[in-house]
Structure formats: C-alpha cells, structure tokens
C-alpha cells in the first residue's frame, strides 16, 4: 500500500483522466464515437436524472476494455448484519452509548469489508429514494477478486482503525484514519486492508453529498473544494473469475464474471469518488461570547427538500482554539429536533472525556436531552476563561439527520456493546439554585 497514487484536486469539478499507459485513450470532440481509441467501449454512469439542471447534473463517461453488462445473472446473497427493516426492533428514546465495536480476530476468522458491514440505525427506505442509514464496518481481510456497488445511495466512509486501499472504476485511493472518502451510487469498488480495520459509514438515498453554503462566513472557511481529491484513471486487464456484489433495495445480490471490473482506461465527467483529509478543515468559532451551534463544523451535507434541513450532515470537532469569554464553552444541555449520532476516531471528546472511546459511538435521538457530563460541567463552570487549545490529538464527528433513526437488533442486542450505564454520567449533576441570589453591583 506504499505505492504512490495520483489524484486530481477539486470538489464537483469536471475531470478528465486517462491511464498514462494508453495515451490518447480519451476520445476527442464527442463522448461516444463510432469507434473509440484502443478499441474501448464507451459507457456512461449517471448520478442524476438526464434532465437535472446543469448545476445539479452529475455523470461521467467511462472508456473501458469491456462494458460492465458482461456478467452472469445476479443471485441472492445473505445480508449478514446489513439490514433496512427498521420496524423489527421497538423504538428506544434513551441516550445510547456503545463501547468500541469488536473487530474479527484474524486467527479465527477472515472477514472482508462487505462481510463486515453491520447496520446500527437508520430511517426511510431505498425504493422511494428517501432516508439514511448508519453502518459500522469491522473487518480483517481484503476483498479478493470481488467488488461491491451500492445501487441505493452514497457511502460516506470514516475509517477509525486501519488504512483502506480502495480500488474503484475511476482509479485507486488510499484512505487513512482522519481521512474520509465518498463512494457514490453505482460506483464499483474493492477494499484491501492490512490487518484489523474498523470505521463508520453514513449512507444517504435522497441526494448526493455537497459542500454546505457558507452564507455570512463568506468565500473561505470550513472545507475547501481544492482539498478534495479524486483518483486518476488506472486499469487492469485481468481475465479471472470475479464476483460482483450489488446492494439493491436493501438486499445483497452476487453475480460472476470472467474478468476484472476495474478495466476503465480513461474517463471524464463530474461524477466520481473522492477523499478528504479532515486536518485541512478550516474551523470558525466565536471570538466574543456564547457557544456556536455545531453546524459551523459541517464538512458535507445531503440536503432535503426543505431549505437548510439536511437528510444527513457530516460534522467534525477538530483541534482548535477556544477564546469565548464570560460563557459556558462546552456544548450546552439541549434537546434537538434532529438525530445526533457521534463517533470518535481518536483522542478524547472534550464534553465526554471518559466512557466515549475511539471506535465506539453515541446516539441522542430526537428531543432526547443530552449535554456535558457532570465532571465536564463542574470544570467548565469554574474555569478561568483564557484562550485555550481544544481537542488536540482528538477527532470526533457527528452524523446528524432530520430523520428519526431506528436502532437495529444488531445495534441494541446482538453486538453486545451497548453501555447500559451511560445515563449515570449525568446523575451527579447537583441543584445549585439559590432563591436569595443577588446580582453583583459595581
């Protein structure tokens, strides 16, 4: 995995890329000429309706050795812990926290990325293209002569432990912890790992992920489009048995073919996978008073039909300076009309320094109260408010959704990682009310 990989910079850009082994493989002047260079096939991958407005229209042209239609019929494949049957488990409004999820032990079992997908919670359904799901992947083996594609929506993948070497039809990416990648609907990919790997996945059906509008922030700040990287063309012409796994309407299917699906010699368009290093996020914050809402830390959003309301937002809490004066700096106690799922890549989250561990998670559902634990409240209420660094060596994130997320059977019982004592972190909060309090006079 130390091989140097090439990328192109920019978010939502129109890219052109050809494998240097076949110069001139991109047709000139038209997308599907009568005969493509090198005897290639032209194939379009559309991520939106043909008639979508230009600024929302996503598609790419692939020039490949064989068209992707060359495979045997799909057959049903066992879904394992991947599920979208939200009504099978009773609703649970309690604050939830999970200890780090178990990764398979390589001495006893080999589990690849697809086999290691476990659905934790979600809402909606893929047939009507509305909703989202949150999965945990825990694996310890590479996918061999096997690829996967999601016909239902986009995957936003957040590695927590172990590097992911991802081969796609568009090229190859190395995605490390503290980086993310997005594999959009319909794109075929395969994942290699080096030992134990674990991470989080946010899946959306309605739309694709986009950068949030900046509004009064102005032209700069948050995630910069130039820091998103898309792979360059790379192909393999391998004639071996290959398995194609499709996730279609929430179910897994498998088809066999006699060649590698990664035979795209050249491509151009604005519909491609991409990666992003979270260390490049430009944080903004208050320099006077009050705790700003976490929306100022939004990296990507999947918008709904309601202005300003996301099907799902990807939010991070990176290392930064805290300089607000005369205010309570940590997240305040609150109840929210959104569902808030948090994960921890590394370090210790400032509002929950114990119990919330890397590789674990929390879920605070709609209108379920939550906030800093007792120790955080005590320390922050008595802190000397000088400029200080926050979250050094830490990266926490949040998947926030306007949908009510249902917990799966695996998430609540099977995984056996639900921390039933989570509620106790607030039980020592004391009453400080003093009816005789008088304001200070100067």
Image: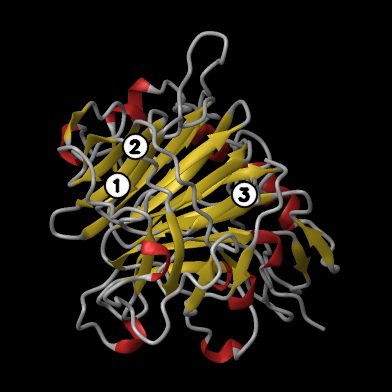
Q: Which one is earlier in the sequence, the residue at label 3 or at label 2?
A: 2
Q: Looking at the picture, does residue 254 appear above or below residue 319?
A: above
Q: Position of residue 111 (x, y in %)?
A: 45, 23
Q: Foreground residue, 201 or 372? A: 201
Local secondary structure at mark 2: strand
Local secondary structure at mark 1: strand
Label 3 or label 2, whichever lies nearer to me, is: 3
The residue that mark 2 highlights is 119
Q: Are marks 2 and 1 in contact (CB under 8 Å)?
A: yes
Quarter-wise, where is residue 222 in the image?
A: bottom right
**CA separation in Å, label 2 and label 1:** 8 Å
How many other residues sit within 10 Å of disc 2, few (<14), some (14-19) or many (≥20)? many
Q: Is residue 59 left or right of residue 164?
A: left
The residue that mark 1 highlights is 122
How many other residues sit within 10 Å of disc 1, few (<14), some (14-19) or many (≥20)? many
Which quarter of the rendering shows the C terminus?
bottom right
Q: Which one is earlier in the sequence, the residue at label 3 or at label 1?
A: 1
Q: Foreground residue, 28 or 307? A: 28
Q: Looking at the picture, does residue 44 appear above or below residue 377?
A: below
Which quarter of the rendering shows the N terminus?
top right
The residue that mark 3 highlights is 174
**CA separation in Å, label 3 and label 2:** 24 Å
Which residue shows up at 43% across the image and 49% down it? 262
Local secondary structure at mark 3: strand
Q: Foreground residue, 387 or 139? A: 139
Q: Position of residue 52 (x, y in %)?
A: 24, 82
Q: Is residue 441 left or right of residue 309?
A: right
**CA separation in Å, label 3 and label 1:** 28 Å
């Amino acid at each position: 995995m130390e091989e140097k990989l090439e990328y192109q910079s920019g978010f939502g850009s129109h890219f052109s890329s050809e494998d240097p082994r076949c110069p001139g493989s991109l047709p000139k002047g038209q997308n599907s000429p009568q005969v493509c260079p090198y005897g290639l096939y032209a194939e379009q991958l559309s991520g939106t309706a043909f008639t979508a407005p230009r600024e929302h229209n996503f598609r790419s042209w692939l020039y490949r050795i064989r068209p992707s239609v060359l495979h045997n019929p799909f057959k049903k494949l066992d879904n394992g812990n991947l599920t979208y049957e939200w009504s099978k488990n009773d609703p649970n409004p309690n604050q939830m926290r999970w200890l780090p999820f178990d990764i398979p032990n390589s001495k006893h079992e080999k589990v690849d990325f697809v086999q290691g997908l476990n659905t934790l919670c979600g809402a909606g359904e893929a047939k009507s293209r509305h909703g989202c799901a949150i999965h945990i992947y825990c694996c310890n083996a590479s996918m061999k002569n096997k690829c996967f594609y999601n016909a239902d929506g986009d995957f936003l993948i957040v590695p927590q432990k172990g590097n992911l070497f991802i081969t796609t039809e568009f090229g190859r990416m190395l995605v490390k912890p503290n980086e993310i990648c997005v594999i959009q609907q319909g794109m075929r990919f395969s994942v290699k790992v080096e030992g134990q790997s674990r991470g989080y996945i946010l899946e959306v059906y309605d739309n694709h992920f986009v950068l949030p509008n900046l509004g009064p922030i102005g032209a700069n700040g948050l995630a910069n489009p130039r820091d998103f990287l898309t792979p360059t063309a790379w192909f393999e012409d391998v004639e071996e048995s290959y398995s194609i796994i499709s996730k279609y309407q929430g179910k897994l299917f498998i088809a066999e073919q006699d060649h590698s699906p990664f035979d795209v010699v050249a491509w151009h368009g604005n519909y491609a996978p991409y990666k992003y290093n979270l260390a490049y996020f430009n944080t903004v914050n208050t320099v006077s008073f009050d705790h700003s809402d976490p929306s100022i830390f939004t990296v990507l959003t999947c918008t709904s039909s309601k202005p300003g309301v996301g099907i799902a937002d990807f939010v991070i809490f990176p290392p930064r300076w805290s300089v607000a004066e005369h205010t309570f700096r940590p997240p305040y106690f609150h109840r929210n009309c959104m569902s808030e799922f948090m994960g921890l890549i590394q370090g210790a989250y400032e509002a929950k320094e114990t119990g919330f561990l890397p590789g674990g998670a929390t879920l605070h559902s709609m209108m379920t109260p939550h906030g800093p634990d007792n120790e955080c409240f005590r320390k922050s209420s008595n802190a000397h408010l000088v400029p200080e660094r926050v979250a050094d060596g830490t990266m926490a994130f949040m998947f926030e959704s306007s949908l009510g997320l249902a917990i799966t059977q695996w998430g609540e019982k099977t995984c056996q990682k639900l921390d039933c004592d989570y509620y106790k972190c607030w039980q020592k909060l004391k009453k400080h009310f003093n009816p005789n309090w008088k304001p200070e006079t100067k």
